């Protein structure tokens, strides 16, 4: 992942969680999102939130929205 393209607030939270820039660069977006969620108190919710967003996007495409 291109660490320079990660929004500052998200990058700072990943760093506060104890990850180095090298570790963050090696993460998938899903892994980084999960770690971001954990830091912000959404423990274990990362995969569930990603699925919900994917389903909402799929629904928007079906109806022609978005």
Image (cartoon, grey):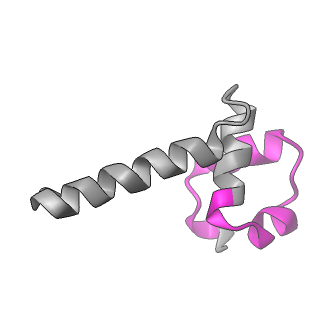
Tell me, yes or no, whether the highlighted magenta stretch contains residue 32: no
Give 51 or 9, whichever is nearer the viewer.
51
5, above or below 33, in the image: below
How far from the left and from the top, in percent, is residue 48? 57, 43
**Residue at point 64%, 51% (across, down):** 33
Q: Tell me where residue 25 appears, x and y as whole percent.
A: 76, 70
- Say above or below: 21 vs 7: below
Q: Is residue 20 magenta?
A: yes
When the figure is inspected, residue 25 is found, relative to residue 48, above or below; the finding is: below
Judged left or right of residue 56, residue 44 is right
Residue 36 vs 27, above or below: the answer is: above
Quarter where residue 17 is shown: top right
Magenta stretch, main secondary structure, is helix
| Residue 50 screen position, x and y as percent | 52, 50
Give me the residue at 63% from left, 44% from top: 46
Q: Where is residue 26 in the image (x, y as percent from the top left)?
A: 79, 72
Locate residue 15 relative to residue 1 in the image: left or right.
Answer: right
**Which residue is drawn at the image coordinates 73% and 31% (left, top)?**
43
Left/right placement of residue 56 relative to residue 54 reads: left
Screen quadrant of the N terminus: bottom right
Quadrant including the C terminus: bottom left
Task: Classify residue 54 by image quadrant.
Answer: bottom left
Q: Which of 56 and 42 is in front in this view?
A: 56
Q: Give the range drawn in magenta.
A: 4-30
């Amino acid at each position: 992942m291109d660490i320079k393209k990660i929004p500052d607030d998200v990058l700072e939270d990943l760093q506060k969680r104890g990850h180095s820039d090298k570790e963050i660069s090696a993460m998938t977006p899903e892994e980084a999102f999960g770690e971001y969620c954990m830091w912000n108190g959404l423990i274990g919710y990362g995969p569930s939130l990603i699925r919900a967003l994917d389903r909402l996007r799929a629904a928007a495409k079906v109806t022609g929205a978005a």
